[in-house]
């Protein structure tokens, strides 16, 4: 198994309530299974996965990639990279696109995606929203929580005024306390916000459960990593769970969680951690393998100034084409 480092700068810093992201540093994992090549990507993100140094050490420790899928449980980004490479090789051996190998039951040409709008003034947020709708996105996710609630309400109102028909979501990255979240949900209901992603810190399930039942749904992202799906379902704490393959340890694990969530009456949405094209393509295959998936947070390639494969996993008119060749993506 070969591991190559890469570094991808963002076109501009992405400001969120959890901080600013300026570049994505990771590793390409290349291997062969019975002479068939496979490629994976491990792109750790602080706060979501192990550190870059821990990821590198875990990858360097791998002697048998298939056996490592069990031993890499504590380093999700490393496991993602190895598992995607293994799945890529296996799907190529089966002469199937990855989404069919994962268990997709029908041919899927594309998956719907949402646009993500970072923190900005109301006017600039509305302008970005208008451009995203003009580009064909069926759903918009607005990052909130970095400003006062009053300012964020103004931003949501500006987006809704500019884009009256689009599905509107918000993502607070756990920035609010319970009273602030309650006020936000009450205000956002007037602008037909479908759900707020991680309104409270990841450590509280009861607080999220208490927010449910109104017009605005509750989405858990960091909370899924903190508690696991079983605890979320038992607490009745979410309407939506956000499944990030890189943070969950691979597209195989993320698919298992997504299908379990669907069976438990909770909608899964597949997103990335602003990954390179190899991991984004894997996430697209994952979304394609889940029937009737809602618009997913996969259109993050445009945030990168450079990419591993600029021709792959690119959003177009609110959707992303699903690669139909063998494995994850065609060889470069």
Image (cartoon, grey):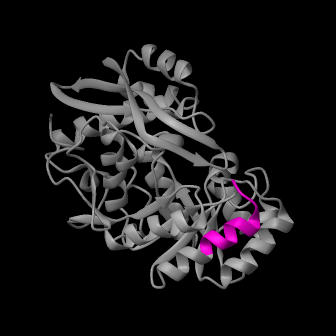
Please indicate, yes or no, whether residue 71 appears anywhere in the rendered image. yes
Q: In the picture, which quadrant includes the N terminus?
A: top left
- The image shows residue 248 at horizontal and vertical percentages of 52, 43
**Percent of width and height locating residue 37:** 19, 29
* 325 sits to left or right of 108: left
* x and y percentages locating residue 328 in the rendered image: 24, 44
Left or right placement of residue 174 versus residue 119 in this view: right
The verdict on residue 281 being magenta is: no
Check the image and report above or below for 230 versus 138: above
Residue at left offset 71%, top offset 69%: 236
Q: Position of residue 237 (x, y in %)?
A: 71, 66
Q: Residue at 73% across / 51% down in the picture?
A: 202
Instruction: Identify the magenta region.
Output: 146-156
Tell which of 318 and 295 is nearer to you: 318
Q: Is residue 101 left or right of residue 56?
A: left
Q: Where the C terminus falls, by quadrant? A: top left
In the rendered image, the residue lying farthest to the front is: 123
Tell me what residue is drawn at x 56 percent, y 20 percent.
54
């Amino acid at each position: 198994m070969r591991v190559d480092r890469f570094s991808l700068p963002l076109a501009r810093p992405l400001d969120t309530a959890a901080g600013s992201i300026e570049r994505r540093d990771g590793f390409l994992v290349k291997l062969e299974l019975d002479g068939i090549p496979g490629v994976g990507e491990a792109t750790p993100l602080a706060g979501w996965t192990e550190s870059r140094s821990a990821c590198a050490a875990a990858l360097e420790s791998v002697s048998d990639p298939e056996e490592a899928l069990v031993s890499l449980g504590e380093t999700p980004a490393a496991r993602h990279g190895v598992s995607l490479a293994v799945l890529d090789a296996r799907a190529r051996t089966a002469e199937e696109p990855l989404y069919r190998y994962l268990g997709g039951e029908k041919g899927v040409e594309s998956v719907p995606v949402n646009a993500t709008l970072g923190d900005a003034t109301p006017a600039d947020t509305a302008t970005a929203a208008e451009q995203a709708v003009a580009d064909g996105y069926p759903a918009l996710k607005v990052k909130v929580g970095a400003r006062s609630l009053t300012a964020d309400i103004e931003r949501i109102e500006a987006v809704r005024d500019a884009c009256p028909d689009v599905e509107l979501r918000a993502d607070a990255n756990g920035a609010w306390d319970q009273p602030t979240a309650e006020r936000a949900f009450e205000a956002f209901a007037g602008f037909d916000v479908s759900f707020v992603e991680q309104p409270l810190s990841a450590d509280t399930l009861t607080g999220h459960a208490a927010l449910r039942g109104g017009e605005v749904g509750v989405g858990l992202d960091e909370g899924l990593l903190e508690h696991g799906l079983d605890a979320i379902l038992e607490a009745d704490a979410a309407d939506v769970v956000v499944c990030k393959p890189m943070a969950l340890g691979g597209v195989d694990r993320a698919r298992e969680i997504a299908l379990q969530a669907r069976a438990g009456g909770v909608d899964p949405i597949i997103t990335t951690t602003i990954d390179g094209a190899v991991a984004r393509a894997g996430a697209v295959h994952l979304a394609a393998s889940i029937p009737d998936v809602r618009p997913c947070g996969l259109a993050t390639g445009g945030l990168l100034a450079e990419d591993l494969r600029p021709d792959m996993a690119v959003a177009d008119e609110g959707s992303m084409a699903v690669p139909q060749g063998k494995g994850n993506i065609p060889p470069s």
